[in-house]
Image (cartoon, rainbow, N blue to C red):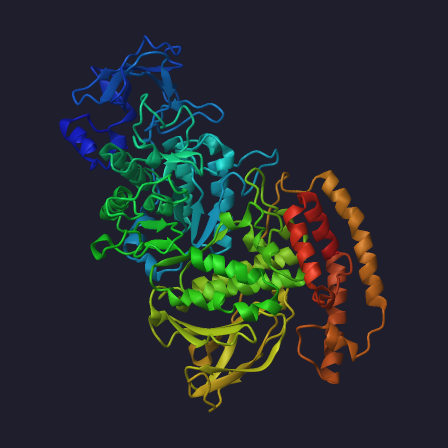
Amino acid sequence: MKTSDLSEFDLYLFHQGTNYHAYEMLGAHFVEQDGKKGVRFAVWAPHAKSISVVGDFNNWDTRVNPMTRIRDGEIWEVFIPDVEQGAIYKYAIEPQWGGARIMKADPYGFYAEKKPETASRVYDLSKYEWQDGDWFEQKKKESSYERPMLTYEVHAGSWRRNKDGEYLSYRELADQLIDYVKKMHYTHIEFMPLCEHPFDGSWGYQITGYYAVTSRFGTPDDFRYLVDKAHKNGIAIIMDWVPGHFCKDEQGLRHFDGQTLYESDNEQLAENWEWGTTNFDYGRTEVQSFLISNAMFWFEEFHIDGLRIDAVANMLYLNYGRKDGEWTPNKYGDTGNLEAMDFLKKLNENIFKYHPQALMIAEESTAWPLISKPVYMGGMGFNYKWNMGWMNDMLKYMSLDPIYRKWNHDKVTFSFMYAFSENFVLPLSHDEVVHGKCSLISKMPGDYWQKFAGLRTFFAYWIAHPGKKLLFMGGEFGQFIEWNYDDSLDWHLPQQYPMHKKMLEYSRALNKFYCDHKALWQVDFDWNGFQWIDCNDNENSVVSFIRKAEDPSDYLIAVCNFTPEVRHGYRIGVPEKGSYVEVFNSDDEAFGGSGVKNEGEIPTEDIKWHDRDQSIVLTIPPMATVYLRHKGQLASGKNSFDEAPVEIEVRGHEEKSSADKAEAAEAKPKKTTRRRTAAAKEETSEDKPKRRRGRPRMTDEEKAAAKAKREAEKAAKAEAEGGEKPKKTTRRRKASTKTTAAKKTTARKTSRKKTTAKAAATES
């Protein structure tokens, strides 16, 4: 990393709010002065009476290394020889009124002590040798808008733990997480904030060290290794960034030099009462230099590919989360924070000036216009925006019992009214699986089988909907309990229970299908990439639409059935004459579905339907999404996914404890006995169609063939898995509203032990 002098020009730019590499000037830098090697410390503290650097190298004595106020009158510096890598230090600041000194961590510190300790550490960022040159050369040739973006959102402290229940290091994450993400065909990893923060429960969103990657998981160079390895494997790295507010911990930025400095003098603007934090003062030019330099720092010193900017609405609105009397309108009598608006435009303009391929993604939860449009067009200058409206509508819709969905059909279709007003990312984020909101699979109504079917249906609809994609960890294999920041994901579920394993395989197959088909991502932000077939069939809760690539002859048809009923003889209009083939089906038995398919070619008929000259007749599976393609576009009439299954390595901590296993073992025989007793009862051929809910009726010949096939499969499974498995028909029996409500409550309240026992009993 470059170290710049405290020149007149550098200082001028800093005070003008246009020094976008202020971290090269301020903080702790290894330099040589008068033939001696050491560290130059520099800090902005205009209100301080005196400052000294204290640390383990001077026994924390405030008299040993006093700092000198330089010519600008606001920045202090001192050179200390023989300070070594990793040395611990703080700034001891004497306020103007005297009294006890304030002990502060370095705002520009590159490394920090591991919590609960709070000091900064000297670190040389110039040693790491990057190996990702090819990655950046390739990025220059591509546009992110016309590439697949399937992001895996990760909390580094709880994705997986080691055998002792401790955090994985950055290097361990590089080895395990990158391999997993690549196998699962995700294209991006988005880390929740990795800046230094004191409290684990803030998930990293309340920061003390904006320039210090958290020491919880290792050193700055360890994190660089993780980013480097991701790039070598073709995976981009996005990091959550929080320029909206900071925590009030005494070692942090609040009242840094004894007075308001990084925050406003106006208490209404400074205080964030709802979150118990402090807002930045966006009108102060030195704060602009601090924040824009920080964004630049992550791109340039850590080679990240994008920032997801948290809580943009909190920045833009003066009244966000505030009661009457807690805010004052701007000079135009409106709610917009004019200084924050100017700051965001300035930030984005300069990031794209230096890094044209950057991803600047706004988490903005309101209808503020033109968030993802360039500044010269009157926009805020981001290039992507999270679509929170789509997320809220669809999660509400998917949580409804299917019988009520026909009266809420607009929740599926409304997002298309504004789908191309911004460059949207469709998030299924961490915020939706905590605080009593239930995990994604627990939101799904119905019995055990229907929950998985609902999640598969939803995921395939989500993939086909215009916009880039983001999924929070654990959703891909159907974790039942809510996310816990202080524990590992339940990796034993896909390892030990078939439905979770099938869900994981489904996610991987769907991800691969998405990456392999341009129609699903090449034209995400324009009507040219999307066309309705039918958005009005609320009675059946079915939607059908077309996704198109830049070449209009390259298209896919998506048909989504949000009920557990098979739709026989379902006619849809299609773009052209010929034959269509089913290329993906979320109801495939390999994914845990009932296996209702459209086999072979589906010929068009000269029957006008949905304002089209040609139409086809389908059988739509229960609670499922299917993709179709014109036969002329395919080398063969089928889609294949023949990769080996993902092997999930469970490492000690993720396995069940002895108590868990005992409880699961105790629960197993009871359930097994009941199911075997039920299976032993005679079933007449008249009973079967009623019980086999969601499948089409079969002829006697078909029943006999199906029975023979089931017996063969049953014998093979019993031999391979060491025991008899419950019939799929049992899983899919009707579930009353009462049962659904009870299961939702259980999913919210049950402990990890009971969740494991329930899964073990169900799968036995």
Q: Is residue 445 above or below residue 157?
A: below
Q: Nearer the viewer, residue 717 or 156?
A: 156
Q: Quadrant of the C terminus?
A: bottom right
Side (left or right) of 715 relative to 307 = right
Residue 555: image location, x then y, percent: 41, 74
Q: Nearer the viewer, residue 536 or 77?
A: 536
Residue 480: image location, x then y, percent: 62, 51
Side (left or right) of 338 relative to 215 = left
Determine the image quadrant of residue 148.
bottom left
Q: Is residue 18 above or below residue 580?
A: above
Q: Is residue 587 above or below residue 699?
A: above
Determine the image quadrant of residue 146.
bottom left
Residue in the image at 18% along x and 30% along y: 10
Q: Is residue 513 visible?
A: no
Q: Quadrant of the N terminus?
A: top left
Residue in the image at 22% along x and 57% along y: 377
Residue 234: image location, x then y, percent: 40, 52
Q: Nearer the viewer, residue 389 or 346?
A: 389
Q: Which residue in the rendered view is the most extreme toward the left? A: 8
Q: Is residue 195 visible?
A: yes
Side (left or right) of 736 relative to 303 = right
Labels in figure, total: 0
Residue in the image at 26% along x and 50% along y: 356
Residue 242: image location, x then y, percent: 38, 40
